[in-house]
Structure formats: structure tokens, C-alpha cells
Amino acid sequence: MGKVDKNGYLYITGRCKSVIVTKNGKNIYPEEVEYYLNDNPLISESLVLGIHKADDDETYINAQIYPNIEAITEYLKGAVPTKEEIWKIVADCVSAVNKKLPNYKHIKSFGIREQEFEKTTTKKIKRYGDNMRVDKKEK
């Protein structure tokens, strides 16, 4: 977190927690959900975030997923996967993860990225900037 003074200087004041708090006060730690997603060999990387819909004040879990195309190709026995096949496979992976989690931690929507997430110098996914952008056409 930070602030910008009247001269345009940026001051770092602290860090935002990555915890997602629902309307009922339930805490969801994105790293836990990401662990289950990344445990699947068909998913290369994921980033979980809380989103708000315009007509509702509830917080929903959204996952941004970068699929492992090589593993998916191998899964399809060498066939080059189409976008629809990738969506179906990732949807199955998300469904499997949701079965392991309590209802309030379920992934309600997801997006598939075509490129890797932007990372820090220590190879951790940045939890800000372009990585946090949610596409409107997600399922």
C-alpha cells in the first residue's frame, strides 16, 4: 500500500494482506486454493482473487489459470488441444478442486491465460498490476 504526495512522490506505507473476506466474515486464503489448483499437472500456474459483481455485495472467488499445454497435449494422446478442449479440461480441474474445499471457498469463475503471470525476481507471482485483471468473458 502507498500514497502519493502533492509533489507526485510515492511513499510505501505497508502491505495489503492477500486474505479474501466474504460478506459473512469468512476468511479465504488464496494460497490454499492455489495449492490445490497447482497440484494438478494440467495446470501450470494459478492466481486466486476475490471479485465483486455489480448487482451483489458478496465476494466471489475467481481463479486466473495458466494451463500446462504440454501436459494437456499428452493427456489428449498427442492431439493439439483446441480452446474449447482446454476450457473443458480446466473446468474439470476446477470442479475437482471445489470438491476438496468447503462451499464458501469454491471457485465460482475462472479465466484462462495465454501467457505466464508476471513474477518478482524471486519467481513469485505478483499480486498486483496486470495479473489482477479479470476478463469479462470468463466462465
Image: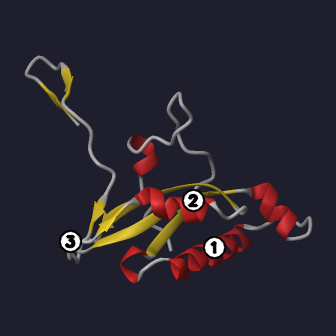
Q: Earlier in the sequence, mark 2 or mark 3?
A: 3
Q: In which quarter of the image is residue 97?
A: bottom right
Say if 122 sits above or below 96 in the image.
above
Q: Name the residue under label 2.
A: 65
Q: Which of marks 2 and 1 is in front?
A: 1
Q: Residue at x 78, y 64 (%)?
A: 72
Q: Which amino acid does label 3 sit on?
A: Gly
Q: Which of marks 2 and 3 is in front?
A: 3
Q: Name the residue under label 3.
A: 25
Q: Which amino acid does label 1 sit on?
A: Cys
Q: What element carries label 1?
A: helix
How far apart are the alpha carbons under marks 3 and 1? 27 Å
Does 122 sit left or right of 126 as displayed?
right
> Pointer 2: residues within 10 angstroms few (<14), some, or many (20+)?
many
Q: Which residue is drawn at 23% across and 37% down?
A: 1
Q: Which residue is more in the foreground, 111 or 22? A: 22
Q: Earlier in the sequence, mark 2 or mark 1?
A: 2
> Pointer 1: residues within 10 angstroms few (<14), some, or many (20+)?
some
Q: Which residue is more in the foreground, 80 or 20? A: 20
Query: Where does the image place residue 23, in percent across and percent down from the top left?
Result: 20, 73
Query: Where does the image place residue 75, in percent across and percent down from the top left?
Result: 83, 69
Q: Mark 1 points at which residue?
A: 93
Does 11 sit left or right of 139 as displayed?
left
How far apart are the alpha carbons under marks 2 and 1? 11 Å
Q: What residue type is labelled 2?
A: Ile
- Please indicate, yes or no, whether residue 80 appears anywhere in the rendered image: no
Q: Earlier in the sequence, mark 3 or mark 1?
A: 3
Q: Which residue lies furthest to the left in this view?
A: 6
Q: Residue at x 91, y 69 (%)?
A: 77
- Please indicate, yes or no, whether residue 19 appears anywhere in the rendered image: yes
In contact (CB < 8 Å): disc 2 and disc 1: yes
